[in-house]
Image (cartoon, helix red, strand yellow):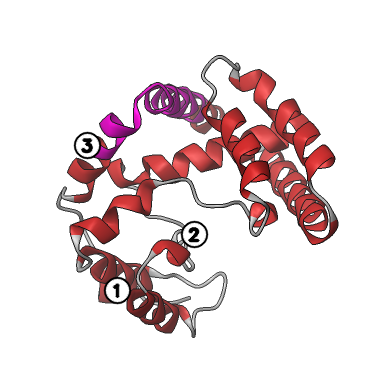
Amino acid sequence: MISKVVFSILLAIVAVQAKPGGRRSPPCGIPPFLDSLPEDAQEKINDIWKDYKEGDKCYEEQGLTREVIDALPKEARKNLHKRPTLPFLKGVPKETLAKFEEIFKDKSIKWSEKPEKIEALAEKELTGDNLKKFKEFKEKKEKEDKEYKEKETKLSEEAKKAHEKIEALNKQKFEILGDLSEKAKEELFDLWRSRPHFRGGRHGGKH
């Protein structure tokens, strides 16, 4: 279970990088890259989401958030695709963070081998509040993984076949992006950000 959980963390990291090219809406809530935005943009986005309750639809909040991001200067938008800092790595020394980054970026390490390396490094390098947050993060992911698997087993045969095909395509997309240089990624993300997209905006009501 642990291996799959940490692997899902890695996929989530790549998924965050890949999102600008997709048509899917991002998850509801304040975006993970908020800290990398200018202070005035952070205030606007925090204000947009201040009354949001988990479980509600968020078309309007997402539309307003996208408007704030689209209004940013190009230089300020450049870092949006970069990997957000995981909660248990916030505030750690640069040397420690670099060790985790090395695993994330090392293309010579197979995806199947990265989870164990990340967990081992966390147990070795993290202390105090960071280690506590890692364990909490891991427990949360284990719970989410279990719930996901339970839903997956209840899929109809038709939905299951479609799901397997989509998962295979997603894996291929992650692998393609993972093999690209940072410059190539930046070119693609800049292109995808300029792609016209539908804003559900004010037409989406709440439950």
Front position among marks 1 and 3: 3
Looking at the image, is mark 1 or mark 2 earlier in the sequence? 2
The amino acid type of the residue labelled 1 equals Leu
For the residues marked 1 and 3, what is the alpha-carbon distance in whole angstroms? 25 Å
Local secondary structure at mark 2: loop
Residue 96 image point, x, y percent:
68, 43
Dominant secondary structure (helix, strand or loop) of the stretch shown in magenta: helix
| Residue 32, numbered label | 2
**Residue that carries the numbered disc 1 in the rendered image:** 64
**Residue that carries the numbered disc 3 in the rendered image:** 187
Task: Specify start and end residues of the magenta stretch as a single range.
Answer: 161-186
For the residues marked 1 and 2, what is the alpha-carbon distance in whole angstroms? 16 Å
Looking at the image, is mark 1 or mark 3 earlier in the sequence? 1
Foreground residue, 203 or 192? 192
Front position among marks 1 and 2: 2
Residues under numbered marks 2 and 3 in contact, where contact means CB atoms less than 8 Å apart: no
Query: Which residue is found at the position 37% from the left and 45% from the top?
Result: 19
Q: Residues within 10 Å of mark 1 (few under 14, many from 20)?
A: some
The amino acid type of the residue labelled 3 equals Glu
Q: Is residue 41 left or right of residue 113?
A: left
Q: Is residue 49 above or below residue 28?
A: below
The amino acid type of the residue labelled 2 equals Pro
For the residues marked 2 and 3, what is the alpha-carbon distance in whole angstroms? 21 Å
Q: Residues within 10 Å of mark 3 (few under 14, many from 20)?
A: few
Query: Which residue is found at the position 60% from the left and 17% from the top?
Result: 109
